[in-house]
Image (spheres, rainbow, N blue to C red):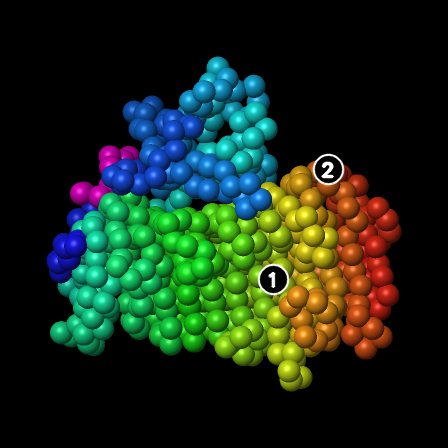
Amino acid sequence: MGTWRHARTQPVSLWREERGDVLTENWIQLYPAPEGAVHNSDFSVRVRIPGGKWKSLFSYNVKVDMHNVRNASMVMFDCSGTVEIEVEHAQEVIREAVIRPQSAGLSGTINGRRLSFAIDGPRLLSVEINGDRFHNLHIFANPPEDPLPEAGRGEVILLEPGLHHTADIQKQLEHSPNTAVRKSIIFGPGIHQLDEPLLQLPSCTSVFIPGGAVVYGGLVCSGVHDVTVTGRGILYMSDFAKTTYYRGFEIKYSRNIRVDGITVIDPPHYTVLLGQSEQIRISNLKSFSTRGWCDGIDMMACRDVTVEGGFLRTSDDCIAVYASRGEFQGDTRDVKVSSCVLWADVAHPVNIGTHGNHEGEGDVIGNISFSDIDILEHHEPQPDYWGCLAINGGDNNTIRNVSFEDIRIESFELGELFNLRVLQNEKYNPAPGKRIEGVRFKNIRFEGTCLNPSHIEGYDETRAVEDVTFENVTVNGSPFQLKEPYIIIGDHARRIRVL
């Protein structure tokens, strides 16, 4: 079993490798390679600040795609200012290299099996060699992480790597000698295994998972408040069976919850489940999933949710916004998603509206905004689930006041750009939706080859789609138009305009 102890000092020097002066413009911070973590040797990656020494990064193995699961690579570090990066492929001579999202405006110098380029600050990137998107390299250059809890600032538990009894950790958190102070738990760098894979967090708890720490398990907030989970560490869930339906984060009936900087690898179900919760802040979350129904962030009956930054590569919807579903009942309102990279190997990058209170009068999903988004993939064999930006209103839902602004959509494999429908999906909806109204698409740019027309359609005369505007939307440089091949507008769709 791993050991724990009360931490009275910050063991920063033990956990972080050599870095530049934090007061200088260019700064980089690396983390130790965790012994026993799953490594991918396809790429060797080195980084440095200009004029500094090259430092090698540990390359994690991450599985991607569901239709044909393959092994990709991922490296991470923290930085500010200019950082030089050198990538060497283990086997292939590099004929061409693409660094995405393309909005980053990055290109590199190729020399045999090596690619060199520089970034000007934190970036979440995909490096694709010789056209291969599935054995690619993910580079997560993060902003500086939160400081560790300071001495004298509450009760701090430091866990060394090893096997932990989950019940012991929970007891220590719940039955602190001083119940009036905030409790903190720090997972030290290395591999942590929990004998019960889901750790329940009490109210007023901080969890810190620093870079180089890998936790085999997930974290649960149920009926709690004021919980934070931060760091550059990993929740590794690839070894858990699909039938467990474990999630990286399960947040239900809770408020004032913050998740920042964590990477989740291959959860059996969602990366983040949000159920009937409010005041949720998720930032710089990274995720990879490969199994069915393994969405990124799904929210049901929630209010005041902010998702900022992050890179979600998922085998189902990257982000889904629902109302009532199962045990979670109520509207979903006031959701803001910004500055994210979305990569749907299956299904939608964005999906809004499917589930609601079909047995009653229905719910409202309202005041939803997505801005400054890069969409890198959308691949869905079933046309009923097409749409990079999809609002599919079912279950008596009313969906209103939704905005999509400053969104770059890159070439994707199979699907369509926009899909707005009031419908009754035979698999998921006992009742059709009520209406979709007040949707704005502004500053949307698509550059690519998948040109299936988008769709807007109501269900009947009383269950319509109304008041949809397109402003400065372009397809391969041409203005978006309300006709084929751009879009098919079906029945019961009113006041659809291009401004």
Q: Quadrant of residue 366?
A: bottom right
The residue that mark 1 highlights is 369
Task: Residue 197: give x, y in percent of width and height.
Answer: 32, 60
Does residue 12 show up?
yes
- Mark seen at residue 491: none
Q: Quadrant of the C terminus?
A: bottom right
Report the side of 218 relative to 243 (left or right).
left
Please say if 351 is above or below 388: below
Q: Foreground: 373 or 385?
A: 385
Is 17 within the magenta? yes
Q: Which residue sits at x=34%, y=71%?
A: 226
Q: Which residue sits at x=32%, y=52%?
A: 216
Task: Residue 324: give x, y in percent of width and height.
Answer: 57, 75
For label 2, the crowd category at 10 Å Cα-Cα, with few meaning under 14, some 14 to 19 and many 20 or more, is few
Q: Quadrant of the N terminus?
A: bottom left
Report the side of 83 relative to 30 (left or right).
right
Q: Amino acid at mark 1?
A: Ser
Task: Residue 270: give x, y in percent of width and height.
Answer: 48, 59
Magenta span: predominant SS is loop
Q: Read off the magenta span.
A: 13-22
Along the polypeptide, which appears first: circle 2 or circle 1?
1
The CA distance from mark 2 to mark 1 is 27 Å
Q: Indicate which label's residue lies in the foreground, 2 or 1.
A: 2
Q: Foreground: 32 or 77?
A: 32
Element type where label 2 sits in the image: loop
Element type where label 1 sits in the image: strand
Report the side of 418 relative to 173 (left or right).
right
Task: Residue 344: give x, y in percent of width and height.
Answer: 58, 48
The residue that mark 2 highlights is 449
Q: Amino acid at mark 2?
A: Thr
Please say if 277 is above or below 482: below
